[in-house]
Amino acid sequence: MVGQRIPAHGTASDPILAVAAVLGTVDVGSFLLTRWRTLLSSAPGRLSGSVVGLALWAGLAVAIGVERSGRGGRRCSLVTTGLAALCGLGNLALMGVHLRVGKGQRRGIFGGILGGVALTGAAARTFRG
């Protein structure tokens, strides 16, 4: 687009990946915000896993922002691709767990969709032509 700065190492899927990263951060953040006290006492493992998920999604959003500003270079591009792949695989696995046990299906499916978008974005960045 005219006037828009797009780094040579970016892809057309980057804006979609950025939206998925922000939505993933909001999703996990709202989950933690509403349930942290219960998770702290009854399921500390779920709490720590959710904190890691929040850090990954937020890190992906920040990495995309740095890369889009043109300051990140090749290393930032690799970090962004790696974070996208981790977020994607983690959320698809989490969706499978949610579907298997029959709990949290709407949130689990939403997270799985975001994970699929992130994984597709990582693949597009990896196999661009």
Image (cartoon, grey):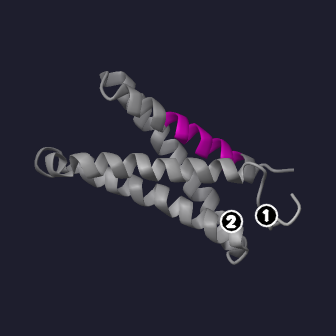
The amino acid on which the numbered mark 1 sits, given as a three-letter code, is His
Q: Are marks 2 and 1 in contact (CB under 8 Å)?
A: yes
Q: Residue at x 32, y 29 (%)?
A: 104
In the shown orientation, is residue 105 left or right of residue 109? left
Image vertical order of residue 49 relative to residue 110, above or below: below
Q: Residue at x 37, y 26 (%)?
A: 105
Q: Which mark is residue 66?
A: none
In the shown orientation, is residue 62 left or right of residue 45? right
In percent of width and height, residue 18 lies at 61, 54
Q: Residue at x 59, y 46 (%)?
A: 118
- Which of these two is toward me, 2 or 12? 2
Which stretch appears magenta? Answer: 112-123
Residue position for label 1: 9
Identify the secondary structure beneath mark 2.
helix
Residue position for label 2: 77
In percent of width and height, residue 26 lies at 43, 50
